[in-house]
Amino acid sequence: MPPSTQLDNERIATSTPESEAGVLVVRRHHLLVRCSHWLNVPILLGLILSGVSIYWASPIYQHKPDPQTGSLDPLADIGIWICAHVPGLHQYSNPPDWVYNHISLGPGMLAVALRLHWLCAYLFMLNGLVFVIGSAMGGGWRSLLPRQTDLRDATRMFWYYIGVPVAKLTRGSWPHPRFNTKYNPLQRVAYFSVPVAGLLSVLTGWAIHKPMQFHWLTAIVGGYDKARIWHFWLMWVFVLFVVPHVILVLADGWDTLRSMIVGWSTKAQRSEDFSQ
Amino acid sequence: MSLENEHSAPEADNTSSTESVHPPKPASFFQERPPQVMEAAPQLLRRWTRRDLLLFGAGAVAAVAAGGALLPQTTLKRLGIIHDNKNWQRKEWLLNKSLRIDDDVAEALYSRNRLVPTYTKSQITPLRNNYNGATPNASYIPEWRLTLDGLASGLSVSLNIRNLLASFQVHEQITRLVCVEGWSAIAWWAGLRFDDLLRAYPPMSQARWVRIESSVNLGPWGNPDPYFVSLDLSTARHSQTLLATHLNGKPLTLEHGAPLRLVAPVKLGLKNIKAITRISYKGGEPPDYWAKHGYSRYDGI
């Protein structure tokens, strides 16, 4: 039985507790949304590791060969710089490969990287479908839609975050702006953008993968070479999302993290001031 | 703060009931719904939490195990996770399967009637010779002949470049060549259509595949390393699949596969074999140089 219906049935069975007082909980995430959320972790990791290995075979950003190192690739330059400046890495055997050795399957792994990339890409598309179905069944998609008040409210959230360190230092009071919605506007922008970025990654991926059979798609995203550039930077959207996402979830506390595992939260207060 | 007043609605007291009894009717289909609040006994919540955390942990362990099984051994060795080669073949099963699925998808997407985009001469870009082996010695050129095998006639046919250019119409096209590595080049090709050769010398009736061999047969140190590709007959019959003799208005150079090379823009560059010496029609799928190195065998793009 899916936990959501179970939650209903067991609530009825236990809604008149004799021994312990009941706790108010609020439904947060549909089971399928939770599954797709966590499956994204290994799938995106596989896509990024293999994707950077594919990038290595023909970097989209190249400069004229460096007279000293012969390098064409800015990522190789970064590796050379790191090995020259970071203590303990001066003896690194192949500095141009340092970046690829640390954020990809490694250099010279194109054949296996392509296979892993296809495997993860098909799983990523299936997982996107799981997310869409879960959002539709749980109705959670409505909480992600942008609204007219978002610009003003996002500005308020932005100033709140800017002020937090100051308030901590001065021990002043700096209340979190209150919103009677599931997510605050900054969260909403982020959680709306990430599925859109996922969709764009899939579209640009197909534009690169099948530039002849899907030549209309390749043309829409600006041609074959542009599609590779979009696809590369969309990867960074995920990376740049994940870092603050993890930090903020951990800062928000156990209830928020747990809600993505169990589906419910004990922060039910919002319902009291939910207004239209 | 004023924020408090702004958002605390003067609403009826609904905290006493476990769920809002009369949820306000949403103004539109897209409007966010009020949260579903319910009451649950603490020991029940603890039980759910325990169960779901155990499931989550099992999933995390499974994901780590899958990662260990799927990541290449050189990567795992570099990370210090393994020290010796493990059973390579078994670990490759899922990756090989996904490659086959992707090839099946590519084959399903392919249509003989769908033409690839063509470009103008001003869009032509430099085409590099990406072959890392030795370019063959030019001495084969005067003696060069193209051999056709697996024909309906049961005979073997041998043609020289003059036969080919005299008996077939020359077609020109400016198309993009896409390399598996990710780079691409727009080049101006001229040559005969593979389809015309197939009409002039029809293959045996059970033929579904073509094996193409090449004079390009030396590795980086001059060691024997013959290049050969497999090609499905459906791709060979595509009207933009050429047996090219000219690049950018000039006869093919040695580097680009003189005197005759395959140009199949619906395939990755690695199928576009240079310096063709033999074309054999086959019933079953013939081996392919890069498929043996772990790449796709279909390579449809």
Image: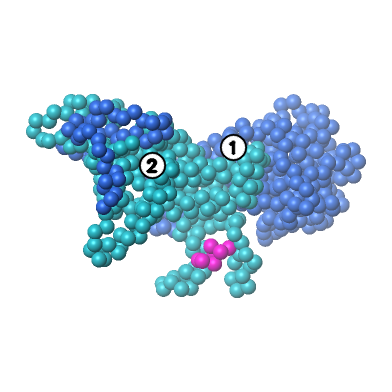
Chain colours: A cyan, B blue
Residue at 66%, 32% (x, y): give it: B284
Amino acid carrying label 2: it is His
Residue at 42%, 42% (x, y): give it: A147
How far from the left and from the top, in percent, is residue A39? 39, 42
B50 is within the stretch colored magenta = no
Image-quadrant location for residue B83: bottom left
Is residue A118 at all visible to an observer of this figure?
Answer: no
Amino acid carrying label 1: it is Asp
Locate the C terminus of chain B by quadrant: top right
Q: Chain of mark 2?
A: A
Q: Secondary structure at mark 2?
A: helix
Is residue B197 at all visible to an observer of this figure?
Answer: yes
Q: Is residue A239 above or below residue B167?
A: below
Q: Secondary structure at mark 1?
A: helix
A77 is within the stretch colored magenta = yes
- Left or right placement of residue B153 versus residue B296 in this view: right
Please name the residue that numbered disc 1 is placed on. B103
Please name the residue that numbered disc 2 is placed on. A37
Which is the main secondary structure of the residues drawn in magenta? helix
Image-quadrant location for residue B134: bottom right
Q: How many marks?
A: 2
How far from the left and from the top, in percent, is residue A34? 35, 39
Q: Chain of mark 1?
A: B
How far from the left and from the top, in percent, is residue B172? 82, 44
Q: Residues within 10 Å of mark 2 (few under 14, many from 20)?
A: some
The boundaries of the magenta stretch are A73-79
